[in-house]
Image: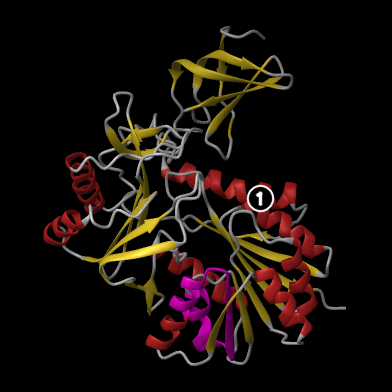
Amino acid sequence: MQKNEIYQTIVDDLTAEGQGVCHIDGMAVFVPGTAVGDEIKVRIVKVLKNYSFGIVEEIIKPSADRVEPDCVYYKQCGGCIFRHINYKKELEIKEKIVKDAFERIGKLGPAFLPIIGCESRKGYRNKAQYPVSADKNGKIICGFYAKRSHRVVSIENCILQPDIFSKIVDIIISYAKEKKISPYKEDNNTGVLRHIYLRKGHYSDEIMVCLVVRKDISRELKGLVKQLTEQVTGVKSIVMNINPKQTNVILGRKNVILWGNDTIVDIMCGNEILISPLSFYQVNTPQAEKLYEVAKEFAELTGNERVLDLYCGAGTIGLSMAHEAGSVLGVEVIPEAVENAKENAKINGIGNAKFICGDAGEIANKLAGEKMLPDVIIADPPRKGCDEQTIDAICKMNPKRIVMVSCNPATAARDCFILSKKGYITEKVQPVDLFGGTGHVECVVLMSKVQK
């Protein structure tokens, strides 16, 4: 097989990254933008030892799963990967991603429950983080990163976001142009405006506008505050986040309140939830409520259990279970999120939930040493999964059940494999799609202590 050769073939599989897989002379060829069943002519663009990459030269006969992408930016933007196939097929692919992770990586055989899909693949996100950059002419632009790059694609309206976000972005970028506020340049850590970060309460409609900047420009932003508060209904908080570091991490540690409150309020599982810029909060509220209902069902609470909620964020999972538990203790490393969680418990009249700030592994280890042993542990780690210290501490505490909520089936499967060697059986896995159109999928896992 040589570069630029053209072959006629049929796509027979799809990867978690949304690339079609076909086989030519025994070699796997990965082809983006295809669907299973597509009969295509493919041009080879890169040849490696065991596999190759190609691009579509011609679609001879389209797959029955193929649909016309409903986003004009789909081919350039790196956000969605499944908008060229129907949603039924997307859910099948995501079920397979979860199942393959647990069977291949985890070497586990739990019961796999049918995936819970979104009501819509449009407008479901309550948060957007728009990188700001300059085009080749030096003109300030805003949008999302292109596939596998940090090149910003200028986007006027993302169909995953509420329509109001586009209006807010337009006001900010127009103001930045007028006041000559320079876009950030990653390569040499110059420029000022790095990201436009927006949050909106799904039920409350309260909006937070957060401007991520390299240095304090609060003086220059006074006119923007006036425009936003006069032109956008629902704005309750305008924040300037200062991030001077040359890093891919979006938010810095310092927030300056330019106007309004330092939080917005939304409802999650019947509880009022305060959300700050640094608080973790699931981006698809209705689907997150379904996710948390599954987690509560898996926890099998009777009203007496001590629940330890690791990586608790603003306390949303633990608080959703508090009325069915004896007590809830949440652990989170971000101080602002812990303060939000404490206030969330207070405003909802939940007296049996407490929250402490610290690294999940360190706190869990300390609790194990003090014999503060929970009956159920809830773990909602970041994409990298649980670290070794956290897993060891979980096992020392010897809970009856572990309920893991994960946005990365691969690391969840890895962690469950480790726990399976330490006396826990992975009973069942529930995939939940919070990110329609994209390659991401959540899952909830129930692990139980092996009875000797």
The verdict on residue 328 being magenta is yes
Residue 125 in view here? no
Q: Please indicate whether residue 414 sits to the left or right of residue 294 in the image.
A: right
The verdict on residue 140 being magenta is no
Dot 1 amino acid type: Ala
Q: Please indicate whether residue 1 sits to the left or right of residue 17 in the image.
A: right
Q: Please indicate whether residue 367 sits to the left or right of residue 89 in the image.
A: right
* Quarter of the image where one finds residue 29: top right
Q: Is residue 60 above or below residue 277?
A: above
Q: Is residue 113 above or below residue 87?
A: below
Residue 272 x, y percent position in the rendering: 36, 79
Q: Residue at image x 37%, y 86%? A: 347
Residue 306 in view here? yes
Residue 216 x, y percent position in the rendering: 34, 55
Q: How is the image coloured?
A: secondary structure
Instruction: Give the SS element for disc 1.
Output: helix
Q: Residue furthest right?
A: 452
Q: Which residues are magenta?
A: 315-341
Specify the quadrant that holds the C terminus: bottom right
Q: Residue at image x 52%, y 35%? A: 18
Foreground pick, 209 / 387: 209
Q: Residue at image x 41%, y 91%? A: 349
At label 1, counting other C-alpha atoms closer than 10 Å, the crowd grade (few under 14, some 14-19, many 20 or more) is many
Residue 1 x, y percent position in the rendering: 67, 9
Q: Is residue 391 above or below residue 232?
A: below
Q: Please indicate whether residue 65 sits to the left or right of residue 231 in the image.
A: right
Residue 84 x, y percent position in the rendering: 41, 34
Reading the image, the residue beneath label 1 is 410
* Quarter of the image where one finds residue 64: top left
